[in-house]
Image: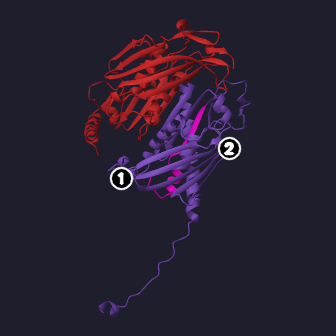
Amino acid sequence: MSSEEIKWEVKSDYIHALAQKGIRQDNRKTDEYRKIQITPNYIPHAPGSALVKIGATQVLVGVSMGVGTPYPDSQASGVLMTGCELVPMASPSFESGPPRPPAIELARVVDRGIRESNSIDFDKLCITEGEAVWMVMIDLHILDYAGNLFDAAELASIAALYNTKMPKYEDGKVIREETSGKLPLLKKPIECTFVKIGNMIMLDPMLEEEKSLDARITLATTEDSSLCAAQKGGNGSFTEKEIMDTFDIAVEKGKDLRKLI
Amino acid sequence: MKNPGIELFKDGKRLDGRKVDELRPIKIEAGVLERADGSAYLEWGANKVLVAVYGPKECLPRHLSDPYKAVLTYRYNMAPFSVDDRKRPGPDRRSTEISKISAEALEKVVLLEQFPNSMIKVFCEVLQADAGTRCASLTAASVALADAGIPMRDLVASCAAGKAGGEVILDLGKKEDNFGEADVPIAITPHDEEIVLFQMDGALSKEEFQKAVSLAKQGCKTIHEIQKAALKKRFEQVKPPIKAVKTEIKKSEVSK
């Protein structure tokens, strides 16, 4: 067992003891986010980008646009692809190499929130049915991991999509120097992540809380207060009531966060 | 995927004639593989899933071992011929995600702390896929773990509910999954109804979501009965061990 692991084990005992008293390490309320900062268009050369900070967590998202062939089962719709790299600089536990399960899960949960809410107007991304459609590629670049990558990555992705410029497409060629308007968007799905430690459920886990979690749940909600994606993680469990309670908080918090974009 | 005009709900019945809260037929058999320590075969509608369990055994590679508990690995894999368009063999992003959350669901029930520094491996092969394969795999996996004699707090029963054709329904079929509005796969530990696996995609209001979760939980309870029956059947077939040969040692022999 490495010294790093022993350190987290001691910390975890402390976080659990605090949770038993209903307290969080930084004295936040159970439904309170850390300070959120959004910098849209952080990489001006990319068609779309945004840097999001939640507390000390930093996620940079870039959106690239390309033209490709549509999927056989949706010939007249654009394509969305979401990738994630847990950049080694972001944490001593991240290593370079092909994406491992946590990175894949993160990318897929962010992707699901955007895809299932129909956030992007995919029908308008069709160039020639069955032949050419726009491909929206979202790349999650984790720069500093201090807990709650899910919400930071989703927020950064939506912020980046909302300032994405479509390149021009003429005679089968993409002209990147010229834009043909903004990416057609319909909704802003917002993800809220909660962790359960002992019997306490708290929003926006910081690193120490994430390392001590029994279970984790992420809920993505849209403007009409409906759920569009969800994911449970961790080897603990939730009751049905706990999930319904987090749903209500996610809807309320979603309204606040949506205003930031 | 866009619905090309298929009516998913007609005259109060679903495409395959089921009611809203009706499961597809499920069949589970435990102990089907010779070499594995535990195994199970499951048919759920047209889904066919085979699960093998190995362990607890030495944790390899060593650096993965945990001095406090066993490491549980879960491999969900779809056979190339299990779907209409041949699936490229090997793990993809979808199966990696399913494997991760399924392992986490099982970690809640397996008494891993009894086997420090060891490893328990669960292999799920989807031989034929027809919607709901992650639930089918997890349901079969917990039977295979029990078949392997690995101590567990409970079984894990898994089932999905969702929305298709405007109705909240239990256990989505292939078309309902492809062209429906939402899918909510869950897994519970039946004795306390705690939710150990939970995902959702699509669009649901709070009321629909509540209805879907409680419907899926009901489905899980029905599946739990089928799991128990499969295990009972398996262990009724086990022959009693060969009687130990009784040997009497005479006192006089010992004293020599």
- In the image, which disc is placed on residue B117? 1
Magenta-tinted stretch: B142-162
Relative depth, front residue between B198 and B55: B55
Disc 1 secondary structure class: loop
Is residue B254 in view from this perspective?
Answer: yes
Q: Residues within 10 Å of mark 2 (few under 14, many from 20)?
A: some
Q: Is residue B207 above or below residue B112?
A: above
The amino acid on which the numbered mark 1 sits, given as a three-letter code, is Asn
Quarter of the image that includes the C terminus of chain B: bottom left
Relative depth, front residue between A139 and B233: A139
Q: Earlier in the sequence, mark 1 or mark 2?
A: 2
Q: What x and y, as percent, mark residue B106?
A: 46, 46
Q: Which residue sits at x=55%, y=28%? A: B201
Asked whether the beta carbons under mark 1 and mark 2 sit within 8 Å of each other, the answer is no
Question: On the image, which quarter does residue A36 sit in?
Answer: top left
Is residue A145 in view from this perspective?
Answer: no
Which hue belongs to chain B?
Answer: purple
Chain identifier matching the red colour in the rendered picture:
A
Cα separation, mark 1 vs mark 2, equals 39 Å
The amino acid on which the numbered mark 2 sits, given as a three-letter code, is Ala
The residue under label 2 is B46
Quarter of the image that includes the N terminus of chain B: top right
- Left or right: A213 with respect to B184? left
Disc 2 secondary structure class: loop
Q: What x and y, as percent, mark residue B249?
A: 38, 88
Q: What x and y, as percent, mark residue B113?
A: 36, 51
Q: Is residue B74 magenta?
A: no
Q: Which residue sits at x=48%, y=55%? A: B54
Q: Which residue sits at x=49%, y=19%? A: A189
Q: What x and y, as percent, mark residue A167?
A: 55, 10
Q: Is residue B8 above or below residue B75?
A: above
